Amino acid sequence: MTDQTTQLARGQVNQVGLTKNDYRGNPSSLCQGCGHNSISSQIIAACYEMNIVPEKIVKFSGIGCSSKSPFYFLNRSFGFNGLHGRMPSLATGALFGDISLHGIGVSGDGDTASIGMGQFKHIVRRNVPMVYIVENNGVYGLTKGQFSATADEGLELKKQGTNPYLPVDIAWEALVGHATFVARSFAGDPKQVKELIKAALSHKGIAILDIISPCVTFNNQDTAVHSYSWGKEHEVALHDLSYVPPAEEIMVDYEDGQLKEVTMHDGSTILLKKLERDYDPTNRAEAMRVLEESNKDCCLITGLIYIDETQPTLIELYNLPAEPLNRLPEERLRPARETMEKLNALMF
């Protein structure tokens, strides 16, 4: 076969010569219709469209249905499945040791908002450069449907009774903890999920994505905040999102409220819609007000809630060299023998 024929047989390739199949993972063993599967599909699409080489990504997870997700995307990437709630410390160490890799962590509401809340808070305040996705379904699906920390107050589940506690709000906790990128989406809105993942992959610090991902087996009643039907009826997008990768600037000029088709650098086109709402995601106080208002009004605000690109990342704080630490030979990591002898002589 000719090169062109071979390429057609493999499928459409991106700018790094890979097909979408090169970004897929193992077949999912999650329930059919689980929102986590939709999120995995959008991670695949985002990485393919952004021409990211899978071997440059390292995946992290803890314990739970959500934490099985990394098996279902980017098979050619590195991956670590850690202890329950301990994914953040695992990711911090790995990304500190190799700053050349993109980090993608996938956690659940139980893994993050219960046993892992302490670790979540600390990875946020350290601004570790990675994408941290919480697949939030408000229930412990892997252990057959107990209330999780994000379950809505008053939720009734068979065999569990009524939940008497207020829910933990992941986006709120991230914002209060000074996360530099906070977004929320709904697994039933794949376009928005993909655009937010692409924006998160381009952010230099910690990017928290709270994605409401219905559990079709244990928490999909019409009245449950984490259900498909409730999400569809109450989703309110802050803005229409279309991500533009960093490259030569593309200038467009059109009026408020108008649609504009724009040709991108790779020849593809996107449709822009000028914002209809005057929302500024760089205003932290406004982000808090919007979250508080949405909770009070019982609606699902989605989109990029907050972004701050001025804060230094953990890597910048420690002024690490451009060469990853795990590639440095021993003689460059340890003090010379003569130096150690001088230090010992000073001490004893």
Image (cartoon, helix red, strand yellow):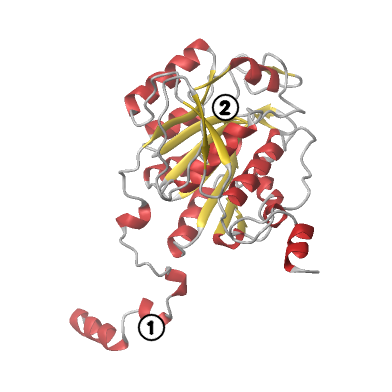
Which quadrant: the C terminus?
Answer: bottom left
Q: Position of residue 5 (x, y in %)?
A: 78, 63
Q: Residue at x 77, y 32 (%)?
A: 33
The quarter of the image holding the N terminus is bottom right
Residue picked out by circle 2: 150
Q: What residue type is labelled 2?
A: Thr
Q: How far apart are marks 2 and 1 (CA)?
A: 49 Å
Picture quarter containing residue 224? top right
For mark 1, give the secondary structure. helix
Mark 2 and mark 1 lie on one chain; the one further toward the N terminus is 2
Residue 331 circle label: 1
Q: Is 220 situated above or below 325? A: above
Residue 124, position in %: x, y? 42, 42
Residue pictured at 76% horizontal, 52% vertical = 26
Single out the residue that lies furthest toward the left. Answer: 346
Say whether residue 301 is visible.
yes
* Residue at the farthest bottom position: 338
Q: Percent position (x, y) of residue 168?
A: 51, 26
